[in-house]
Image (spheres, grey):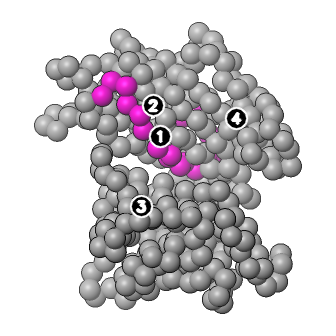
């Protein structure tokens, strides 16, 4: 990989932008995977290659404002927005959350037309977004589409200091990233199989994975994000079978105690100061759904927890997942 030219003002906001670009998930184009991207969409929050950059420019700045990481002058607000999104992985977890089964992203050698179709579908038409996050932009609207959507992402996934609801002010202490990896030997709810998806609930927040059709051993590898209030309880997990013409059938459930994860993370505060190590454990017992003790570890500066669950109130089914704790200052 070629080295980036030195940016001005080391330690400045632009220096932080360079640090973000050097993260492992940002070393490839967010749209085609080409290595060493030197361009970015400042209002979307992704790093892109030269070929995809041309397509982004054609969409107009109301959808994608393209800047060179090295050559262009960036405002502090633009750099802060990039850093706040968190990079390509965080953005793609949202913009590609509902990509159809069997759909393939364009590769580094894709044609211009292939890139155009994919990038328009992803950002302009919002075809791969969770439906509740999609925004319909009327011709009479003077507000940039992507500015509206960026605010909606931050409202949904960023834990600000407080959030207003009918019960008053809720104080958040951090973010919980949940990666649903796979299910094993799930229950049959159709003739010979099931169409499973996973629903997570924390307080009044509910998020869910995509549906995997006709599969009792589904692989999701999907990341879901939830804000954690100060007065948090367990995360409730439910697996359902999707039905087109009737109510979805339950395929098992479990509760996830996030207290051990948060307590361990709080004790070590800044995990980037430590090497890889075990810092806590959630013990298997007859009162929980664990298949085995669940260890909490610092891995590459992040606090993570691998969990293997036996689904409850169902004839069969196991689930593998990973939790990651993200403090507000991260």
Task: Tell me the number on the disc at residue 182.
Answer: 2
172 sits to left or right of 166:
right
**Distance from Cα at disc 2 to Cα at disc 1:** 7 Å
**Distance from Cα at disc 1 to Cα at disc 4:** 21 Å
The answer to whether residue 226 is magenta is yes
Q: Magenta region: which residues?
A: 215-235
Q: Mark 4 points at which residue?
A: 261
Secondary structure under tag 4 reads: helix
Vertical side of 125 occupied by 329: above or below: above
79 sits to left or right of 313:
right
> Around disc 4, counting alpha carbons within 10 Å, would you say few (fewer than 14), some (14 to 19), or many (20 or more)?
many
Q: Mark 3 points at which residue?
A: 107
Q: How many marks?
A: 4
Instruction: Give the residue displayed 32% in from the left and 32% down from the top.
Output: 196
- Residues at discs 2 and 1 in contact (Cβ within 8 Å): yes
Secondary structure under tag 3 reads: loop
Q: Name the residue under label 1.
A: 221
């Amino acid at each position: 990989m070629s080295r980036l030219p030195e940016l001005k003002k080391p330690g400045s906001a632009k220096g932080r932008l360079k640090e973000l670009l050097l993260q492992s998930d940002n070393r490839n184009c967010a749209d085609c995977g080409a290595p060493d991207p030197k361009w970015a969409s400042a209002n979307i929050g992704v790093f892109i290659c030269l070929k995809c950059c041309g397509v982004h420019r054609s969409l107009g700045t109301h959808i994608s404002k393209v800047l060179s990481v090295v050559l262009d002058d960036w405002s502090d607000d633009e750099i802060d927005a990039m850093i706040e999104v968190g990079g390509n992985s965080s953005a793609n977890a949202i913009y590609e959350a509902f990509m159809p089964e069997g759909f393939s992203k364009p590769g580094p050698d894709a044609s211009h037309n292939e890139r155009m179709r994919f990038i328009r579908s992803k950002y302009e038409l919002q075809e791969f977004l969770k439906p509740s996050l999609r925004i319909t932009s009327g011709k009479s609207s003077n507000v940039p589409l992507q500015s509206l959507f960026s605010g909606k992402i931050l409202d949904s996934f960023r834990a600000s200091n407080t959030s207003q609801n009918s019960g008053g002010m809720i104080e958040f202490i951090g973010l919980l990233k949940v990666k649903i990896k796979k299910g094993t030997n799930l229950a049959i709810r159709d003739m010979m199989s099931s169409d499973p998806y996973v629903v997570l609930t924390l307080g009044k927040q509910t998020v869910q994975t995509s549906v995997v059709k006709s599969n009792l051993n589904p692989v999701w590898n999907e990341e879901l994000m939830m804000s954690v209030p100060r007065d948090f309880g367990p995360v409730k997990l439910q697996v359902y079978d999707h039905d087109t013409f009737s109510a979805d059938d339950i395929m098992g459930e479990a509760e996830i105690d996030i207290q051990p994860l948060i307590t361990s993370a709080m004790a070590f505060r800044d995990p980037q100061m430590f090497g890889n190590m075990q810092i806590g454990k959630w013990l298997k017992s007859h009162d929980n759904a664990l298949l085995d003790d669940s260890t909490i570890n610092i891995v590459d500066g992040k606090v993570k927890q691998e969990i293997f669950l036996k689904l409850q109130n169902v004839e069969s089914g196991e689930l593998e997942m990973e939790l990651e704790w993200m403090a507000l200052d991260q």
